[in-house]
């Protein structure tokens, strides 16, 4: 259905000049009287988009204005180029044009005085209130080409309240900053989804801003990674958000360009709800969650406590203690190989080659443990046979230069080049099929994203193909492993980066990935439970990386899998290893503490529970709180340096509950779901179990 204004642009301009589109904040003006009716608002109570006669939009929630009018969808002119305003000429609607969304697509078309025709399509699904999918298309109907530096979608600003604004950003940065953080006045983060350092890039293409009463999230719904930015910036009065492409282009006469399919969500609470909605929509569009074997929830010991210069006797000697503590996985970390890229067995550790490695894996199995092996694909060291024989595999920039992988002083291989894929999948089949490992720890910040590749040997259709095909590389790795062992674990640990969402369907476990604090363990856990599902097998990473090196409560309380890299009965004494004071040796005192928390982990089994991330706002609720439903009980974890006062146990079904501190096994009292508050006092953490005892 199309409504046409039936007016020339000059007539529309004259009419607009005498009509006020906005009377006051929160007041909706009557639409201009055109020759045919033009609807100027569409959506639902959770999110309504209002468009004025200049094709500017504002967002309303429950009939109240959440933002002011803005040029939310627009072209970005190149320097020295001016674009005239757009004038609304027609609107229409049809069945949804966006895969994965039902409902209605509303369209609005307008023209500018210099001949650019703009059509914006807004799709609303009644099953997903508060969410719109947006596509803008621009056609040059003029006689001259127009130089552009990009385009922008879903650009809106949220007024800041007294308590400020928080933000989630899915971009990756070399400083490994928090994914969830306040956005005070002066905050400015571009959130580019390409490379923000030579080996830090990619991520989840969504950003979110929220205040205590309302929030906005923006992202894209494409099925491949795209090199766009999601800028968030704060002034003293508001915080802005948008999706932008900054790739310059020229729009010739008669040509048209369409933006990416853009995700816009209005919500209450923190980022958990919009990230969950994003995951669900992407699943409906084809990116489904990975199959998760039961072993993904088993506790993990990693040999990285001995670092690269371990010897196999150290690892084998630690296994009895690992088993005794109730841990099921033993992970061989970096150092088994001669070099990244060649992946030959180190003859000092495995002098008989494959036979020694097979025997080593058998020793792990004989100890009653599951073996997993560390691997850093897509990296090749200088001086390796692979680099000597296959320079064609290298990812090269436009100047023919290599791309650095900083941690290993290595170079990046192109994931979209078939020989690279064949080389890596052959290695995976050997590790799983011949050596007998049951899983892989895929490690390195370079695994999350790669820059465009200009290597002429690859015959890419376009340089960005390397970026877009990275998930297909991981699919090939996944398929190679699971074709031999359907329950193989593929752990994705891209060292401090924000997980590449498009790669997650091919991974069935992720850790906190080198967290810098317990806060990062918890916030990464919350976002991962949104992006991979509320029972996702998220590991808190080695507990030694938490605050004080002992904070099991952060992993257990958010439903994380516990993991440790202790050494026993003594640390390595290799002088080139860089260890903290006292190393990672499991002293008798630490052993008692480790045993207590690993037992609690098994007893309550929270990693398999349903994480209720929608119940608490991690930015504004104090103390910080998390909730999990498991085994007909509800669990609540609270965190603060020190806290004394009431806490609220949200989400309880009607009835009375007995509340127990699971760490001390002390009953704190009873409460009714109708008044679910109780007074507590704690330092650092408090983990509660609420068990229903009556109606």
Image: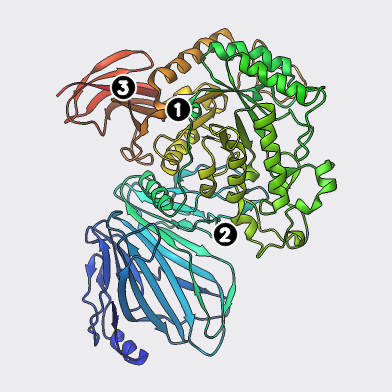
Task: Tell me which label, 1 or 2, sits earlier in the chain.
Answer: 2
Mark 1 closeness class: few <14, some 14–19, many ≥20 residues within 10 Å: many
Q: Looking at the image, which residue is at 37% across and 70% down?
A: 121
Q: SS at mark 2?
A: loop
Distance of label 2 from label 3 (alpha carbons):
44 Å
**x then y, percent, for residue 665:** 34, 13
**x then y, percent, for residue 334:** 70, 30
Task: Tell me which label, 1 or 3, sits earlier in the chain.
Answer: 1
Q: Looking at the image, which residue is at 59% across and 71% down?
A: 248
**x then y, percent, for residue 617:** 34, 40
Left or right: 485 as drawn, with respect to 103:
right
Q: Do the residues labelled 1 and 3 touch (CB within 8 Å)?
A: no
Residue nearer the viewer, 294 or 687: 294
Instruction: Return the mark for residue 227.
Output: 2
**Quarter of the figure with the N terminus:** bottom left
Mark 1 or mark 2, which is nearer to you?
2
**Quarter of the figure with the C terminus:** top left
Mark 3 closeness class: few <14, some 14–19, many ≥20 residues within 10 Å: many
Instruction: Return the mark for residue 282.
Output: none
Residue nearer the viewer, 230 or 530: 530
Q: Name the residue under label 3.
A: 689
Mark 2 closeness class: few <14, some 14–19, many ≥20 residues within 10 Å: many
Distance of label 1 from label 3 (alpha carbons):
16 Å
Q: In this view, does 188 lie above or below 675?
A: below
Instruction: Return the mark for residue 554.
Output: 1
Left or right: 320 as drawn, with respect to 594:
right
Task: Tell me which label, 2 or 3, sits earlier in the chain.
Answer: 2
**x then y, percent, for residue 203:** 54, 49
The answer to whether residue 596 of the structure is visible from this angle is yes
Residue nearer the viewer, 425 or 34: 425
Quadrant of residue 123 in the image?
bottom left
Q: Looking at the image, which residue is at 82% across and 25% down?
A: 347
């Amino acid at each position: 259905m199309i409504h046409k204004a039936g007016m020339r642009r000059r007539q529309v301009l004259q009419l607009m000049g005498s009509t006020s589109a906005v009377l006051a904040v929160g007041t909706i003006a009557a639409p201009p009287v055109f020759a045919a009716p033009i609807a100027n608002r569409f959506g639902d109570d959770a999110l309504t988009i209002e468009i004025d006669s200049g094709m500017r939009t504002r967002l309303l929630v429950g009939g109240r204005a959440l933002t002011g009018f803005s040029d939310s969808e627009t072209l970005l002119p190149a320097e020295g180029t001016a674009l005239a305003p757009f004038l609304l000429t027609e609107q229409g609607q049809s069945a949804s044009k966006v895969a994965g969304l039902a409902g209605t697509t509303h369209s609005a078309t307008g023209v500018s005085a210099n001949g650019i025709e703009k059509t914006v399509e807004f799709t609303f699904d009644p099953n997903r209130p508060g969410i719109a999918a947006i596509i803008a298309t621009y056609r040059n109907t003029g006689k001259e080409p127009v130089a552009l530096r990009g385009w922008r979608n879903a650009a809106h600003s949220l007024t800041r309240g007294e308590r400020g604004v928080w933000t989630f950003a899915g971009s990756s940065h070399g400083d490994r900053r928090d994914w969830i953080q306040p956005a005070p006045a002066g905050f400015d983060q571009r959130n580019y989804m390409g490379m923000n350092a030579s080996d830090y890039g990619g991520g989840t293409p969504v950003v979110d801003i929220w205040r205590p009463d309302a929030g906005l999230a923006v992202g894209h719904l494409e099925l491949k990674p795209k090199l766009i930015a999601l800028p968030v910036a704060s002034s003293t009065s508001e915080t802005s958000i948008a999706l932008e492409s900054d790739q310059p282009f020229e729009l010739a006469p008669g040509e048209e360009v369409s933006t990416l399919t853009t995700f816009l969500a209005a919500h209450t609470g923190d980022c958990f709800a919009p990230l969950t909605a994003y995951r669900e929509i992407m699943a409906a569009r084809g990116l489904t969650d990975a199959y998760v074997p039961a072993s993904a929830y088993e506790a993990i010991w990693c040999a990285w406590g001995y670092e690269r210069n371990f010897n196999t006797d150290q690892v084998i000697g630690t296994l009895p203690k690992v088993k005794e503590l109730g841990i099921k996985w033993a992970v061989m970390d970096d150092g088994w190989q001669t070099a990244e890229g060649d992946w030959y067995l180190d003859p000092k550790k495995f002098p008989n080659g494959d036979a020694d490695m097979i025997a080593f894996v058998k020793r792990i199995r004989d100890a009653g443990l599951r073996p997993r092996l560390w691997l850093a694909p897509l990296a090749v060291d200088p001086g390796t046979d692979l680099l000597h024989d296959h320079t064609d595999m290298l990812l090269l920039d436009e100047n023919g230069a290599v791309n650095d992988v900083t941690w290993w002083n290595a170079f990046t291989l192109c994931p979209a080049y078939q020989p690279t894929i064949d080389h890596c999948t052959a290695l995976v089949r050997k590790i799983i099929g011949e050596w007998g490992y049951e899983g892989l720890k895929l490690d390195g910040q370079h695994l999350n994203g790669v820059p465009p590749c200009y290597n002429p040997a690859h015959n890419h259709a376009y340089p960005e193909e390397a970026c877009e095909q990275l998930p297909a590389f991981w699919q090939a790795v996944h398929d190679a492993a699971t074709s031999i062992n359907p329950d193989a674990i593929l752990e994705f640990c891209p060292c401090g980066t924000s997980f590449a969402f498009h790669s997650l369907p091919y991974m069935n476990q992720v850790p906190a990935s080198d967290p810098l604090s317990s806060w990062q363990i918890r916030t990464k856990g919350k976002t991962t439970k949104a992006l991979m599902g509320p029972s996702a097998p998220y590991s808190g990473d080695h507990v030694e990386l938490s605050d004080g090196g002992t904070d099991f409560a952060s992993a257990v309380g958010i439903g994380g899998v516990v993991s440790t890299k202790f050494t026993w009965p003594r640390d390595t004494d290799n002088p080139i290893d860089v260890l903290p004071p006292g190393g990672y040796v499991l002293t008798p005192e630490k052993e008692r503490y480790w045993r207590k928390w690993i037992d609690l982990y098994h007893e309550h089994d929270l990693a398999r529970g349903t994480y209720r991330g929608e119940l608490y706002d991690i930015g504004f609720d104090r103390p910080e709180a998390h909730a999990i439903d498991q085994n007909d009980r509800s669990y609540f974890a609270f965190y603060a340096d020190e806290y004394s006062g009431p806490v609220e146990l949200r989400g309880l079904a009607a009835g009375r509950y007995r509340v127990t501190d699971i760490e001390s096994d002390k009953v704190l009292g009873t409460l009714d779901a109708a008044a679910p508050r109780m007074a507590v006092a704690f330092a650092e953490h408090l983990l509660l179990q609420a068990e229903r005892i009556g109606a």
